[in-house]
Amino acid sequence: MDRIRQFADVVVRAGINVQPGQGVILRTDTAHLEIARAVVEAAYAAGAAWVEPLWSDGRIRRSAVDHASLETLTASRGWALQRIREWSDQGIASISLLGDPDPHVLDGADPAKAAAFPAEESRLMREAVLGRLRWTAVGAPNPGWARQVFGEPDTERLWEAVGTAMRLDSADPVGEWRRRSATLAERGAALDALELTSVRYTSGGTDLTVGLIPGCRWIGGGMVDAAGVAYLPNIPTEEVFTSPDRRTAEGVIQVTKPLVLNGRLVLGLRLEFSGGRIVAVSAESGADIVEAQLETDPGARYLGEVSLVDAESRIAKAGIVFHNTLFDENAACHVAWGGSFPFAAAGGLEMSPAEREAIGLNQSAVHTDVVIGGEGITVTGTGPKGTVDIIRDDAWVL
């Protein structure tokens, strides 16, 4: 329980940075009950006015996929849209506890229905968290997740790995995260100074070049909301990232970590890009669920994020595959198809959807990160000062 309380303290103080009188929503699976209780307690101790848990459950989701129509699964509800608008107006904080307790729960289900969700609700919530709300996403250990990682439900061993990745093994985890955030922010500033026009990722199975939006910002570590309150969107985080020009990706990527997508495990994923668009998908398993998500909306086949992570990452040092995107994406360089981050472009948050599209930002209800880095990865950047090495053989050299 001491470890769980420490975990909750990091989530509330370093992650979401709950302010007195603020409302909080907690998105969590039923498998995370004990941890969720500790996070709620910590949020109230930090001064939260109210905390509302929003529960999910894999078996309940499977029932919906098996029995509800595709139209029902994708329909947005007026009351749900209004709730999101009120959360945005009130400036609530949003916490998500991740850690899939059963990545096989949707095996054998209709891929289109397994990938279905209310797109307008998702879009509105994404606009809220990218514009007005503070949010954080954190991995919560559970037996099912431990089984994915170790082949047995060894939750204690998973807690040790998660503790290393989240810096819970230090005397002052909150202080450690503030220091790490400062280092990542310095990397972002160094990249901004180069005024890069493109980045290129190369490794054994990857050769991808992506153009960048003029004046785009590289974001690392924490962020600051409109009221000047600092927070960490992800714990752990080891990345520096930006949103590219969606029209410019060319080449191929070989995904180097497993992907859990809509309750399915995707292995050996390979994607080809032309004119910014994903034009070919192959995988050892799970290609159908990837294709189904890419058909969600017109923007789903284009990139919304490019990210830089080196071998000094705490997740990389843990030496295991977490089978959890939040962790595995922070072990190595990654990209994401789907929605862009408007705040990465100068004035992006104030732009209309049409203006964002005109400068190259991508608009989609999905955002899926896939890892392409690790041993052997090299990333170069090109701009007015020429081509420079950023990462060489998985080591930060800029």
Image (cartoon, helix red, strand yellow):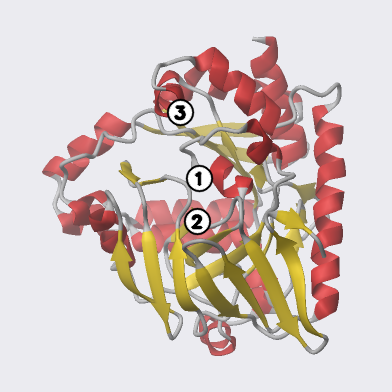
Residue sitting at x 86%, y 50% = 182
Q: Position of residue 376 (x, y in %)?
A: 61, 56
Measure the alpha-carbon separation of dots 2 and 1. 7 Å
Q: Amino acid at mark 1?
A: Thr
First-in-chain label (3 vs 2): 3
Residue sitting at 55 percent across and 63 percent down?
Answer: 203
Identify residue for label 2.
369
Residue bearing the label numbered 3: 149
* Above/below status of 66 relative to 270: above
Secondary structure of residue under mark 2: strand
Disc 3 secondary structure class: helix
Say which residue appears at 76% left-offset and 29% top-offset.
46
Circle 1 is placed at which residue position? 325
> Label 1 neighbourhood size at 10 Å, few (<14), some (14-19), many (20+)?
many
The answer to whether the residue labelled 2 contacts the one labelled 1, judged by CB atoms less than 8 Å apart, is yes
Please state the horizontal and vertical placement of residue 77, each as a whole percent of the image. 32, 55
Count of labels shown? Answer: 3
Q: Quadrant of the C terminus?
A: bottom right
